[in-house]
Amino acid sequence: MTPRRLILLSTFLAAGAIVNLAVAWGIAARAEIRWNPVGPGPSLSGSGPGWSRDVEFEILESLPHAETGARVNDSFAAGWPARAIGWREIQVLDRTRRQLVPEPTWLIVRGVEAPAPARAQLFSASEGRLPVLPLFPGFLLNTLFYTAALALPLGFIAIRRRLRIARNRCPACGYDFAGLAGAMCPECGAERSEP
Ligand SMILES: [Zn+2]
C-alpha cells in the first residue's frame, strides 16, 4: 500500500468513526428514559432504538474491599446499526450482607456528564450523560460500516476509470479513442497515458 493510499484510508476511517459517534449521540439525545427514584427495582426504564438495560453482578478486582462486588445498576447503549457507545452506572455491593454498601453509596458512572448547554437541550432525555464508553464489537463494526459508505463513491469512480481505460476510452470523460492518436483527449484534454 502506497503512503498516499494509507493516508486516504486513515482519513476515511477517522471520518467513519466521527459519523459513528455522531449517530450514536444523536440517538442518545433522543432516547426516552423514565426516571423512577422511589422504591426497589430498576431506577430507569426506557424505550427507543438506543436503549438497553441490563442488571448484572460482577467482581471489581480493583476495589479496596475483597468482599465487595459491583452491580451494573443501569446501562445505556446507543448506535446504529450496532450499539456502539454507552454509559454504565455501577453500584457497589457488600457481598457478605448481600446489600448495598451503606451511605455514601459508591456509585461509579462510566460515562461523562454532558456539557451544561448540551445537557439541558440535547441530553436531558438520556439523564444528561454523554455516552463515551466504546462498546465492542459494535463501535468497530459501525466505524467500518460508515467508512465503507463514505468510500463507496470513490471506489465507484476508480472502477469506472479502469473500465474506460480497458475499453480504450478517456479515463476522465469516457470519450472513445478508437482510431485516434495523440497523448491528450480531444474532448476534455485529459492525458491518455494516465494509469
Ligand atoms: Zn476526456
Image (cartoon, grey):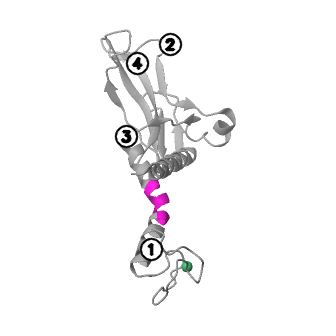
Give, as a single range, the part of the protein colored magenta: 146-154
Residue at the disc numbered 4: 92
Quadrant placement of the C terminus? bottom left
Whether the residue under disc 4 has CB within 8 Å of ligand 1: no
Residue 118: x, y in percent? 65, 39
Question: Total label count?
Answer: 4
Residue at image point 64% right, 33% down: 115
Q: Hey, what amino acid is under mark 3? A: Phe
Where residue 160 is drawn, which disc sits there?
1
Question: Which of these two is toward me, 120 or 7?
Answer: 7
Residue at the extreme bottom = 179
Residue contact between numbered discs 4 and 3, judged by CB atoms under 8 Å = no
Task: Give the CA separation, mark 2 to mark 4.
Answer: 10 Å
Where residue 136 is drawn, which disc sits there?
3
Residue at the extreme right = 117
Q: Quick one: label 2, few (<14), some, or many (20+) residues within 10 Å?
A: few
Where residue 33 is drawn, which disc sits there?
none
Q: Hey, what amino acid is under mark 1? A: Arg
Answer whether residue 141 is magenta in the image.
no
Question: Which of these two is toward me, 53 or 77?
Answer: 77
Question: Which of these two is toward me, 112 or 13?
Answer: 13
- Asked which secondary structure carries label 2, the reply is loop
